[in-house]
Image (tube, rainbow, N blue to C red):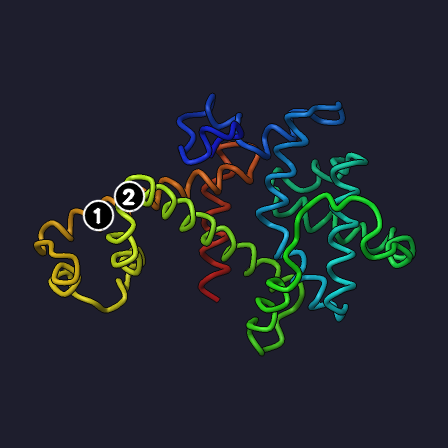
């Protein structure tokens, strides 16, 4: 997934193309004032704000307090250049974001607590109601804040991939086919046979197999692109993929 808005659905192709992903743009900008880097960072934050919200809530903060803290944190990131922690994050946006948030909570807590709700511009549009509804569905077992962040990060990434795949299918006029076959993207396939799926769609079993194969292939491409979008180099992508799969398997 590339940083330019008209190329968001296409995976990176090779190292040269890889360097245009969102996080690599932010890192390349360093401490300079870059409109492109700010846009890239903002897009990443818009996608991955909920894992931070869940992290703060798991620390025991109230819904309103958690929203305020995440908003104040993003204001720091976007306005005051919080990239000083990037080198210690080993190039992963996931690691950078959590390290930076922990530093913010430690160093800016008193200041953040005094911020008035609704005062000033909000850097990222957060749906607080949706966030708290999502948080209410989190596992009842006592996952630590760090483990909850990791799991929410991985699930948010997968949700982003599914959403982009759905958008592509709708644009191609295949929304009905996608809605019926989307459960087949996973190895389990939802437990429905290709013959049953074909009967629903008026397609032969063979045609369903081909359609599922193509969806899975595109899903993998978009997954690789989204992972690439949050690491600094192609060398880090395989390790990040393994880590995310490990988090989801726990």
Seen at 76% across and 64% down, the residue is 64
- Label 1 SS: helix
* Position of residue 8 in the picture relative to residue 90 (left or right): left
Which residue is denoted by mark 1 in the rendering?
213
Residue 24, image x and y in percent? 59, 30
Q: Residue at x 50, y 60 (%)?
A: 247
Classed neighbour count for the residue bearing mark 2: other residues with Cα under 10 Å, few (<14), some (14–19), many (≥20): few
Give residue 13's position: percent from left, percent from top: 40, 27
Q: Nearer the viewer, residue 23 or 131?
A: 131
Residue 177 x/y as whole percent: 24, 52
Q: Which quarter of the figure has residue 146?
A: bottom right
**Dividing the picture into quarters, in which one does residue 102 lie?**
bottom right
Task: Identify the residue at horizontal 40%, vertical 51% (top origin).
Answer: 162
Residue found farthest to the bottom: 140
Per the model, the C-alpha gap separating discs 2 and 1 is 6 Å
Compared across the picture, whether 136 is left or right of 110 comes to: left
Q: Which residue is mark 2?
A: 217
Q: Secondary structure at mark 2?
A: helix
């Amino acid at each position: 997934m590339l940083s330019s808005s008209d190329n968001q659905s296409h995976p990176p192709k090779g190292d040269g193309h890889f360097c245009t992903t969102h996080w690599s743009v932010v890192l390349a900008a360093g401490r300079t004032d870059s409109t492109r880097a700010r846009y890239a960072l903002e897009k990443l934050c818009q996608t991955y704000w909920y894992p931070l919200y869940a992290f703060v809530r798991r620390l025991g903060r109230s819904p309103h307090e958690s929203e305020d803290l995440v908003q104040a944190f993003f204001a720091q990131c976007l306005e005051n250049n919080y990239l000083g922690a990037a080198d210690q994050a080993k190039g992963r946006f996931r690691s950078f974001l959590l390290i930076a948030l922990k530093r913010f909570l430690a160093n800016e807590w008193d200041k953040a607590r005094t911020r008035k709700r609704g005062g000033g511009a909000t850097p990222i549009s957060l749906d607080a109601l949706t966030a708290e509804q999502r948080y209410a569905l989190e596992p009842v077992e006592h996952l630590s804040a760090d483990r909850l962040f990791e799991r929410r990060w991985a699930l948010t990434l997968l949700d982003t991939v599914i959403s982009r795949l759905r958008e592509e299918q709708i644009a191609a006029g295949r929304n009905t086919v996608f809605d019926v076959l989307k459960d087949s993207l996973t190895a389990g396939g939802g437990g429905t046979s290709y013959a049953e799926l074909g009967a629903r769609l008026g397609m032969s079993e063979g045609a369903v197999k081909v359609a599922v194969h193509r969806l899975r292939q595109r899903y993998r491409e978009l997954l690789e692109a989204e992972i690439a979008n949050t690491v600094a180099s192609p060398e880090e992508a395989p390790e990040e993929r393994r880590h995310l799969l490990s988090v989801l398997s726990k």
